[in-house]
Amino acid sequence: MKIIPLTTTGPDERGYTCEYFHERMGRQLLVFRKAGTVSGRHYHKGISLTKNPEIFILLHGNCVLNWRHVNETEIQSTMLTGPVRVDIPPYEWHEFIAETDCTYIELNSLAEHIADTFYIP
């Protein structure tokens, strides 16, 4: 039996994140968000392979997903109830609004996320 504690990263009013190394797939993010908080409000260019597309797996909870292509103005919206997988293509601005406490996995590392995250002014 092997038990490995996970270190939390970036705790704030929304919740916290854990980055872990999966021996078969590399670094990934486990994200815990509190009800009423917002995550995202950015887009990725697909510079990192893990962001082309970005793969987001909502394990538990309900959240609203809003998105639009960066060259468009109309925002689309849907309610997500975990478990569900979302593939986010490059140049899609997106935000997640937690309706309940949520837990999700991002199939990328924190460094990959930071290197390929852009904001619309």
Image: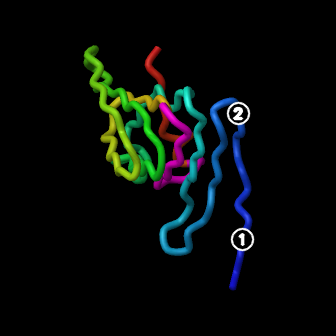
Expressed as whole percent of the image width and height from the top left, the position of residue 55 reads 39, 50
Q: With 78 as the anchor, is 110 left or right in this view?
A: right
Q: Nearer the viewer, residue 36 or 18?
A: 36
Name which residue lies at 49% across and 52% down. Answer: 105
Name which residue lies at 69% across and 85% down. Answer: 1
Position above or below: 119 against 18: above
Expressed as whole percent of the image width and height from the top left, the position of residue 46 reads 37, 43
Name which residue lies at 51% across and 36% down. Answer: 100
Give residue 4's mark. Answer: 1
| The stretch drawn in magenta includes residue 81 | no
Q: Nearer the viewer, residue 99 or 52?
A: 99
Name which residue lies at 34% across and 33% down. Answer: 79
Type of the residue with mark 1:
Ile
Q: Which region of the structure is painted magenta? A: 99-111
Q: Quadrant of residue 90?
A: top left
Give residue 12's mark. Answer: 2
Q: Secondary structure at mark 2?
A: strand
Q: How is the image coloured?
A: rainbow
Q: Could you tell which of marks 1 and 2 lies nearer the N-terminus?
A: 1
* Crowding at mark 2 (Cα within 10 Å: few <14, some 14-19, many 20+): few
Q: With 110 as the anchor, is 85 left or right in this view?
A: left
Query: Residue extending furthest bottom?
Result: 1
